[in-house]
Image: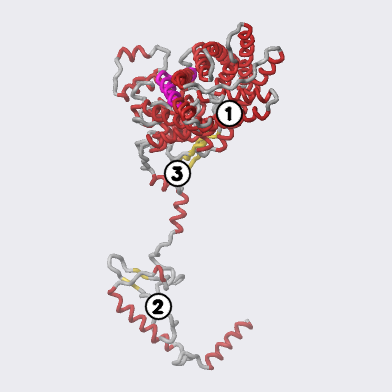
Amino acid sequence: MSILDRLAAWTGKARPASAAADAAPTTSTPAVDALNSEAMGHDTMGNIATIDAAKAAPPPSPLAPIDLTDQSQVVGVMDIAARIGVILITSGTSNPDARAQVHLAASAYGLHYCHIDILTSTVTIHANMVTPDGRQQPLHVFRVAPRISLNFQKLAAVDKLIRSIHSGATPPAMAEKILDEIESMDPPISTFTTLVAWGAMGGFFSLILGGGAFQAIVSFFVAFTIMGVNTYLEKYRLPIFYQNIVGGFIAVLPAAVLFHLATYLDVDFSPSQVIGMGIIVLVAGLTLVQCIVDGITGAPVTSAARLLEAVFYTGAIVAGVGMGIQFVGYIGFELPPLATVAPPVYLEVPFLIIFGSLGSAAFAYACYASKKETVIAGCTAGAGMIFYYFLLLVLGIGNVVTAGIAAIAVGLAGGLMSRRFGIPPTVTMIIGYTPMLPGLTLYRGMYASLNDQTITGFRNLATAVAIAGALAAGVVLGERVARRLRRPQRFRPYSAFRKISRYSYNQATRLAVRTRSIPRVPMSPFAPRHNRPVPPPEFAGEHAGVRQTLSTSSSLPSPTEDAFPATTSWPAQTPTTYTSPGTGEWPEIDLEGLAAEQPGERADGQRDDSSKAQDRAQDTGRADA
């Protein structure tokens, strides 16, 4: 049975014999095609995200579908989980969410008590396996992920794979084949179509920044050129740092040339919108949101690494723009002074919202998102733009606060819509806030700094950093609220197993040895008081008689509380004989004979002088010997 047949059987829809026969010789990926079916989508878990199911409850079955004493099977499951984690973190998923989904995939195959560590670009999984002879054998799986590259096609495919594994529909062998197909998946669109989408994104965003139709057309070709050159440099494995420098330089050069050409032809053209658009296109794919999420949710090392990476890449963009400004000034194409941009009027706001939605949808499509994900991402960005212009124009709030509140709306709307339509929330988080990125503010800061306006430049740069931080923090908060609203009820059926697993077999053995228990045969005739059994009622008289006899004797020790009957015959047990260490049975004490053998002791309990003299003589003889 092929992979597609297995998934078709799980979905309850039998495949025709002709379809099964025709599927064999084709070169398509049947497993991924089956995962893209509607049954493997949001209907599997209802209107919740995969991360919600991962943090709300473990897999539904406590039975392990693999042999946990077989090293090959255990390592195979750990490798599947590690490969899933690599795809998640390279697609922009935050560290805690990726760790939770990796643990979900491992626990679905029976490895519920494994340790997962994701640090920047590495995935480490540790588990202990019990061998058939009862020994514990530690196992480790380590994977290194490449750099983050926004590929929403692979993200959606691995999200559906995790849902299928969680539901118990995908065995390990089938999961390995699906992962092979996901890792070798070709882009759904051609390179030219991808560049056209990037150009459309740049054209719409230049309209949001205040440009006209001519600026939009120029921005389309500038964005097309920037991403085309970066794609060409990527083939030669040039680091992204230098790609951003080249992109920033390209954003300035055609804008300056066209400004002087438009001035000569008496055409209204502002180069600042084109340069600001180029900065937004380059900044859009950075890891700003991911580093904020990691810092908030308890992954400071990964957060610091990604933040430093984002700072380096942003610095490369700024350096490229600065080099472009100085180069065009050197060749005689001076850029005009920055003019104050007036806020949009109310009649322009609906068009700006539409432009923002279309530009965000083009960005999602350029990152290989599906049609459904593209539409939802565009609608999410439109919702954020509505809040942005309402707060900015109607209430008159500042740019930083406006960006933060609008980002909260983006995170909330995107989180709810992504859960409703069964797409990863990461898509809407990354796409939704893109129209509000401070590309134009960043360009103003750079231009002012390079033209001896240090205070103005520093103020603009600080404002750009504050807006970026507010956007990231706001979208994270909004998505957290959506997660709280749509999260299913927590269910922890394995808590008892977790408590048991705190002790290993050896620890449990040592604990049992240290436990105090009542000895069946005491090693002393005088049992400890806290372990002394209570005598049965039928021996009460005999016990009292023994105590009375011992108390009247002058030769035995006075404390009689520790005396115990020599033999007992309790009901429901055999007669027990108590012995003393190194001797046989405890003989019955002849009190009268013992008293007769002590002639030197008076009735008052004091020994006479003759007995004392005999004792001293014996001691002296021992000393001489």
Residue 182 seen in this snapshot? no
Q: State which mark lies toward you, 1 or 3.
A: 1
Disc 1 from disc 3: Cα separation:
61 Å
User: What residue appears at the point 47 percent right and 30 percent down from the top-left corner?
Assistant: 391
First to last magenta residue range? 363-384
Q: Are marks 2 and 3 in contact (CB under 8 Å)?
A: no
Q: How far apart are marks 2 and 3 (CA)?
A: 49 Å
Say which residue label 1 marks: 464
Residue 334, disc: none
Question: x, y (%) of residue 238?
Answer: 62, 19
Residue 529 visible in the shown view: yes
Query: Of residues 360 and 463, which is closer to you in this image?
Result: 463
Q: Is residue 24 above or below residue 511?
A: above
The quadrant where residue 561 appears: bottom left
Expressed as whole percent of the image width and height from the top left, the position of residue 459 reads 62, 30
Q: What residue type is labelled 2?
A: Glu
Residue type, mark 1 in image? Ala
Q: In which quarter of the image is residue 462?
A: top right
Residue placed under numbered mark 2 in the picture: 561
What is the image's colouring?
A: secondary structure
Residue most toward the bottom? Answer: 609
Callout 3 secondary element: loop
Disc marking residue 134: 3
Position above or below: 85 against 281: below
Residue 129 coordinates in the image, percent (x, y): 46, 39
Question: Residue 611, position in %: x, y?
Answer: 52, 91
Is 2 included in the stretch rendered in magenta?
A: no
Secondary structure that dominates the magenta span: helix
- N-terminal-most mark, 1 or 3: 3
